[in-house]
Amino acid sequence: MPECLFCKIARGEIPSDKVYEDGRFLGFRDIQPQAPVHVVVIPKKHIATMNDAAEADAQILGDLLLVCRDIAKDENVAEPGYRIVINCNKNAGQSVFHIHAHVLGGRHMTWPPG
């Protein structure tokens, strides 16, 4: 199994402030939150970037968004609004090369984001 930071968190080798976990996904609070609610959601399967996702990963990618939706509901930001962000590679801000989504909410978001 890959030795990336998020794989280690998924295996429980590095502690995290978990808000969601099932057999395929883990959601935990970001250690440098950019909003009052900032949860990182990862598939437990290692996929480095969106560019590395295969057609066979379509179900995982779709379910990742549904887990984000459920976390937004659980964190009480679904109705006022929330943002889901997936960065791909360094220029987009990806710093951990294990595909992940950020669920951000609890404040008004502006556009453009970057």
Image (cartoon, grey):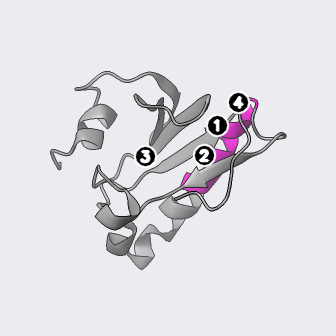
Q: Label 3 to label 1, Cα distance in Å?
A: 12 Å
Residue displayed at 31% across by 21% down: 15
Residue marked by disc 3: 42
Few, some or many residues within 10 Å of mark 4 (<14, 14–19, 20+): few
**Secondary structure type for disc 4:** helix
Give above or below for 5 relative to 112: above
Give above or below for 72 relative to 50: above
Residue marked by disc 4: 74
Q: Label 4 to label 3, Cα distance in Å?
A: 17 Å
Residue 10 in the image: x percent, y percent? 33, 36
**Amino acid of disc 2:** Val
Residue marked by disc 2: 67
Q: Label 1 to label 4, Cα distance in Å?
A: 5 Å
Q: Badges 1 and 4: C-beta atoms under 8 Å apart?
A: yes
Q: Label 2 to label 4, Cα distance in Å?
A: 10 Å
**Amino acid of disc 1:** Ile
**Amino acid of disc 3:** Ile
Q: Label 3 to label 2, Cα distance in Å?
A: 10 Å
Residue displayed at 68% across by 52% down: 110
Residue 75 in the image: x percent, y percent? 69, 29
Q: Badges 2 and 1: C-beta atoms under 8 Å apart?
A: yes
Give the left or right position of residue 106, taking residue 114 as reference. right
Give above or below for 75 relative to 63: above
Earlier in the chain: of badge 3 and badge 2, it is: 3
- Of residues 59 and 13, the one nearer the viewer is 13
Give the extent of the magenta segment: 64-76
Q: Is residue 29 visible?
A: yes
Residue marked by disc 1: 71
